[in-house]
Image (cartoon, rainbow, N blue to C red):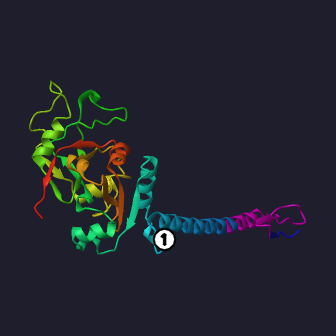
Amino acid sequence: MNGVHEKKHGYWIFMTKVYLDGSQDEDWYSETMAAQTEETLAALEAKITVLEKSSWSKLTGDDDVAADNITKELKRVRRHVQQSNCFSSTWKHCPSNYYSLSLDERKVILGAKSTSQLCKGCLFENKNYKPNENNEGDTKGGVDPTNSKYYLVVVQYVESINTKKLASELRGLRPVGANRFDPNYFVDMRLASEEDNAKLTGFQHNGVSPFGMLDNSIPIVLCKSVINIRPNFIWMGGGHPDWKLGMAVTEFVKGLNAIVLDISEPREL
Protein backbone atom coordinates (compact mmCIF):
# COMPACT_ATOMS: atom_id res chain seq x y z
CA MET A 1 0.00 0.00 0.00
CA ASN A 2 1.35 3.40 -0.91
CA GLY A 3 1.55 6.02 1.81
CA VAL A 4 -1.01 8.79 1.54
CA HIS A 5 -1.90 11.83 3.58
CA GLU A 6 -4.83 14.15 3.21
CA LYS A 7 -6.48 16.95 5.14
CA LYS A 8 -10.01 16.44 6.44
CA HIS A 9 -11.95 18.91 8.59
CA GLY A 10 -8.76 20.82 9.38
CA TYR A 11 -6.79 17.74 10.52
CA TRP A 12 -4.10 15.80 8.68
CA ILE A 13 -4.76 12.06 8.27
CA PHE A 14 -1.59 10.00 7.82
CA MET A 15 -1.09 6.53 6.49
CA THR A 16 2.33 4.87 6.59
CA LYS A 17 3.87 3.60 3.37
CA VAL A 18 3.95 -0.20 3.57
CA TYR A 19 5.75 -2.49 1.11
CA LEU A 20 4.62 -5.92 -0.07
CA ASP A 21 7.04 -7.63 2.30
CA GLY A 22 5.34 -5.90 5.24
CA SER A 23 8.13 -3.42 5.93
CA GLN A 24 7.35 0.26 6.52
CA ASP A 25 9.06 3.35 5.20
CA GLU A 26 9.60 5.20 8.50
CA ASP A 27 11.68 7.92 6.82
CA TRP A 28 8.74 8.84 4.61
CA TYR A 29 6.47 9.09 7.64
CA SER A 30 9.00 11.15 9.63
CA GLU A 31 9.63 13.55 6.76
CA THR A 32 5.90 13.99 6.20
CA MET A 33 5.26 14.62 9.88
CA ALA A 34 8.15 17.09 10.09
CA ALA A 35 6.85 19.03 7.09
CA GLN A 36 3.34 19.24 8.50
CA THR A 37 4.66 20.22 11.95
CA GLU A 38 6.63 23.09 10.42
CA GLU A 39 3.54 24.20 8.53
CA THR A 40 1.44 24.11 11.69
CA LEU A 41 4.03 26.01 13.75
CA ALA A 42 4.34 28.67 11.05
CA ALA A 43 0.56 29.13 11.02
CA LEU A 44 0.47 29.38 14.82
CA GLU A 45 3.32 31.92 14.85
CA ALA A 46 1.47 34.05 12.31
CA LYS A 47 -1.70 33.97 14.44
CA ILE A 48 0.26 34.89 17.58
CA THR A 49 1.85 37.85 15.78
CA VAL A 50 -1.59 39.10 14.72
CA LEU A 51 -2.96 38.69 18.26
CA GLU A 52 0.03 40.48 19.82
CA LYS A 53 -0.29 43.39 17.42
CA SER A 54 -4.00 43.63 18.16
CA SER A 55 -3.35 43.46 21.91
CA TRP A 56 -0.76 46.26 21.84
CA SER A 57 -2.94 48.33 19.51
CA LYS A 58 -5.77 48.13 22.05
CA LEU A 59 -3.39 49.12 24.86
CA THR A 60 -2.18 52.22 23.06
CA GLY A 61 -5.18 53.06 20.89
CA ASP A 62 -2.77 53.08 17.94
CA ASP A 63 -3.80 50.79 15.08
CA ASP A 64 -0.52 51.46 13.27
CA VAL A 65 1.68 49.68 15.84
CA ALA A 66 3.97 47.43 13.82
CA ALA A 67 4.48 43.84 14.92
CA ASP A 68 8.27 44.21 14.69
CA ASN A 69 8.07 47.03 17.27
CA ILE A 70 6.87 44.57 19.91
CA THR A 71 10.24 43.39 21.19
CA LYS A 72 11.02 40.71 23.76
CA GLU A 73 11.95 43.50 26.19
CA LEU A 74 8.50 45.09 25.85
CA LYS A 75 6.84 41.73 26.42
CA ARG A 76 8.97 41.19 29.53
CA VAL A 77 8.02 44.58 30.96
CA ARG A 78 4.32 44.10 30.23
CA ARG A 79 4.33 40.65 31.82
CA HIS A 80 5.92 42.04 35.01
CA VAL A 81 3.42 44.92 35.12
CA GLN A 82 0.53 42.47 34.82
CA GLN A 83 1.97 40.16 37.48
CA SER A 84 2.36 43.16 39.80
CA ASN A 85 -1.37 44.00 39.48
CA CYS A 86 -0.71 47.53 38.27
CA PHE A 87 -4.20 48.03 36.89
CA SER A 88 -3.72 51.74 36.23
CA SER A 89 -0.89 51.06 33.78
CA THR A 90 -1.04 52.45 30.26
CA TRP A 91 1.33 52.49 27.31
CA LYS A 92 2.32 55.09 24.75
CA HIS A 93 4.18 54.54 21.49
CA CYS A 94 6.24 57.70 20.92
CA PRO A 95 7.84 59.15 17.78
CA SER A 96 11.49 58.24 17.15
CA ASN A 97 12.56 61.87 17.75
CA TYR A 98 11.02 61.87 21.25
CA TYR A 99 14.32 62.52 23.05
CA SER A 100 15.18 65.47 20.82
CA LEU A 101 12.03 67.24 22.02
CA SER A 102 11.60 69.52 25.03
CA LEU A 103 9.97 68.26 28.21
CA ASP A 104 6.86 70.31 27.40
CA GLU A 105 6.62 68.68 23.98
CA ARG A 106 7.08 65.20 25.49
CA LYS A 107 4.38 66.01 28.03
CA VAL A 108 1.92 66.72 25.22
CA ILE A 109 2.75 63.44 23.47
CA LEU A 110 2.15 61.46 26.67
CA GLY A 111 -0.97 63.37 27.61
CA ALA A 112 0.54 64.32 30.96
CA LYS A 113 -0.65 67.34 32.93
CA SER A 114 2.81 68.36 34.11
CA THR A 115 6.45 67.76 33.20
CA SER A 116 6.85 66.65 36.83
CA GLN A 117 5.17 63.39 35.84
CA LEU A 118 7.97 62.45 33.44
CA CYS A 119 10.54 60.14 35.07
CA LYS A 120 13.60 58.09 34.18
CA GLY A 121 15.45 55.15 35.71
CA CYS A 122 19.17 55.42 36.55
CA LEU A 123 21.25 52.43 37.62
CA PHE A 124 23.71 53.31 40.40
CA GLU A 125 26.61 51.20 41.61
CA ASN A 126 28.16 51.33 45.07
CA LYS A 127 31.89 51.18 44.41
CA ASN A 128 32.51 50.42 48.09
CA TYR A 129 30.16 47.45 48.15
CA LYS A 130 31.05 44.47 50.34
CA PRO A 131 28.77 41.42 50.70
CA ASN A 132 27.10 40.80 54.04
CA GLU A 133 28.78 38.37 56.36
CA ASN A 134 26.75 35.24 57.19
CA ASN A 135 23.87 36.53 55.00
CA GLU A 136 23.01 39.04 57.70
CA GLY A 137 20.15 41.29 56.65
CA ASP A 138 19.21 39.18 53.63
CA THR A 139 15.53 38.76 52.86
CA LYS A 140 13.88 35.49 51.92
CA GLY A 141 15.18 35.82 48.37
CA GLY A 142 18.75 36.29 49.57
CA VAL A 143 18.73 40.02 48.86
CA ASP A 144 19.44 42.81 51.33
CA PRO A 145 17.91 46.09 50.12
CA THR A 146 19.99 47.95 52.73
CA ASN A 147 23.21 46.66 51.17
CA SER A 148 23.02 46.16 47.42
CA LYS A 149 25.81 46.69 44.93
CA TYR A 150 23.29 48.24 42.53
CA TYR A 151 20.18 50.39 42.96
CA LEU A 152 17.83 51.52 40.23
CA VAL A 153 16.79 55.08 41.08
CA VAL A 154 13.64 56.53 39.51
CA VAL A 155 13.75 60.32 39.39
CA GLN A 156 11.79 63.08 37.66
CA TYR A 157 13.37 64.87 34.73
CA VAL A 158 12.76 68.15 36.55
CA GLU A 159 14.83 66.90 39.49
CA SER A 160 18.44 65.79 39.83
CA ILE A 161 19.85 63.17 42.18
CA ASN A 162 21.96 64.49 45.04
CA THR A 163 24.55 61.77 45.68
CA LYS A 164 25.25 63.06 49.20
CA LYS A 165 21.57 62.68 50.04
CA LEU A 166 21.57 59.27 48.37
CA ALA A 167 24.49 58.09 50.49
CA SER A 168 22.90 59.39 53.69
CA GLU A 169 19.47 57.92 52.97
CA LEU A 170 20.83 54.49 52.00
CA ARG A 171 22.90 54.38 55.19
CA GLY A 172 19.76 55.33 57.13
CA LEU A 173 17.95 52.19 55.92
CA ARG A 174 19.65 50.38 58.79
CA PRO A 175 18.79 51.38 62.37
CA VAL A 176 21.35 53.06 64.57
CA GLY A 177 23.63 50.45 66.07
CA ALA A 178 26.44 48.04 65.34
CA ASN A 179 24.95 46.97 61.99
CA ARG A 180 24.76 50.48 60.54
CA PHE A 181 27.40 51.15 57.90
CA ASP A 182 30.31 53.52 58.25
CA PRO A 183 29.46 57.10 57.10
CA ASN A 184 31.72 56.63 54.07
CA TYR A 185 30.24 53.32 52.90
CA PHE A 186 27.87 54.86 50.32
CA VAL A 187 29.87 57.96 49.40
CA ASP A 188 31.08 56.49 46.09
CA MET A 189 27.76 55.90 44.34
CA ARG A 190 28.20 56.18 40.59
CA LEU A 191 26.13 55.62 37.49
CA ALA A 192 26.74 52.07 36.29
CA SER A 193 28.61 51.55 33.04
CA GLU A 194 26.60 51.07 29.83
CA GLU A 195 27.82 47.47 29.73
CA ASP A 196 26.63 46.70 33.27
CA ASN A 197 23.41 48.60 32.66
CA ALA A 198 22.59 46.50 29.60
CA LYS A 199 23.61 43.25 31.30
CA LEU A 200 21.64 43.84 34.51
CA THR A 201 18.54 45.61 33.23
CA GLY A 202 18.35 44.04 29.78
CA PHE A 203 17.44 47.39 28.22
CA GLN A 204 19.21 49.81 25.91
CA HIS A 205 19.85 53.49 26.53
CA ASN A 206 16.63 55.52 26.95
CA GLY A 207 14.63 52.32 27.26
CA VAL A 208 15.35 51.36 30.89
CA SER A 209 12.28 50.34 32.86
CA PRO A 210 12.07 49.41 36.56
CA PHE A 211 9.73 46.62 35.46
CA GLY A 212 11.04 43.51 33.71
CA MET A 213 14.72 43.94 34.55
CA LEU A 214 16.84 40.84 33.93
CA ASP A 215 18.25 41.09 37.46
CA ASN A 216 15.08 41.48 39.50
CA SER A 217 17.03 41.43 42.78
CA ILE A 218 18.13 45.05 42.30
CA PRO A 219 16.23 47.33 44.74
CA ILE A 220 14.11 50.08 43.22
CA VAL A 221 14.44 53.52 44.80
CA LEU A 222 11.83 56.21 44.12
CA CYS A 223 12.64 59.84 44.81
CA LYS A 224 10.35 61.20 47.51
CA SER A 225 9.52 64.25 45.41
CA VAL A 226 7.44 61.99 43.14
CA ILE A 227 5.01 61.23 45.95
CA ASN A 228 3.68 64.79 46.01
CA ILE A 229 3.03 65.34 42.30
CA ARG A 230 -0.55 65.90 41.13
CA PRO A 231 -2.08 64.07 39.47
CA ASN A 232 -0.33 61.21 41.26
CA PHE A 233 0.58 59.46 38.01
CA ILE A 234 4.01 59.03 36.41
CA TRP A 235 5.52 58.09 33.06
CA MET A 236 8.72 56.06 32.74
CA GLY A 237 10.71 53.92 30.30
CA GLY A 238 8.77 50.98 28.92
CA GLY A 239 11.64 48.75 27.83
CA HIS A 240 12.28 50.45 24.47
CA PRO A 241 13.25 54.05 23.59
CA ASP A 242 10.01 54.52 21.64
CA TRP A 243 7.70 53.14 24.35
CA LYS A 244 6.66 54.78 27.61
CA LEU A 245 4.83 53.22 30.53
CA GLY A 246 2.53 55.18 32.81
CA MET A 247 0.83 54.27 36.09
CA ALA A 248 -0.37 55.54 39.45
CA VAL A 249 2.45 56.20 41.92
CA THR A 250 0.77 54.09 44.61
CA GLU A 251 0.70 51.04 42.33
CA PHE A 252 4.29 51.66 41.29
CA VAL A 253 5.47 51.61 44.91
CA LYS A 254 3.38 48.58 45.82
CA GLY A 255 4.10 46.62 42.66
CA LEU A 256 7.88 46.99 42.93
CA ASN A 257 8.17 47.24 46.71
CA ALA A 258 10.01 50.48 45.96
CA ILE A 259 12.03 52.29 48.62
CA VAL A 260 10.98 55.94 48.83
CA LEU A 261 13.90 58.22 49.77
CA ASP A 262 14.51 61.97 49.88
CA ILE A 263 17.47 62.07 47.47
CA SER A 264 16.72 64.69 44.81
CA GLU A 265 16.54 68.44 44.37
CA PRO A 266 15.03 70.73 41.70
CA ARG A 267 17.03 70.85 38.52
CA GLU A 268 17.95 74.17 36.94
CA LEU A 269 16.29 73.99 33.53
> What's the residue at 83%, 66% (across, down)?
17
Viewer-closest of 132 and 61: 61
The residue identified by callout 1 is 67
Q: Position of residue 26 (x, y in %)?
A: 76, 62
Range covered by the magenta-colored residues: 7-35
Q: Position of residue 70 (x, y in %)?
A: 45, 66
Residue 151 appears in the picture as rendered? no
Q: Secondary structure at mark 1?
A: helix
**Viewport quadrant of the C terminus:** bottom left
Residue at figure coordinates x 18%, y 28% from the top left: 175
In the depicted structure, whether residue 186 falls above or below residue 176 = below
Give the side of residue 99 with respect to residue 48, left or right.
Answer: left
Please tell me in which quadrant of the rendered image residue 2 appears: bottom right
Total of numbered circles in the picture? Answer: 1
User: Which corner quadrant of the image does residue 12 belong to?
Assistant: bottom right
- Seen in the picture, residue 224 relative to 21 is either above or below; the reply is above
Residue type at numbered disc 1: Ala
Q: Quadrant of residue 98?
A: bottom left
Q: Is residue 187 left or right of residue 196?
A: left
- Horizontal and vertical percent position of residue 5: 80, 69
Q: Residue at x 23, y 73 (%)?
A: 100
Indicate the quadrant containing the N terminus: top left, top right, bottom left or bottom right.
Answer: bottom right
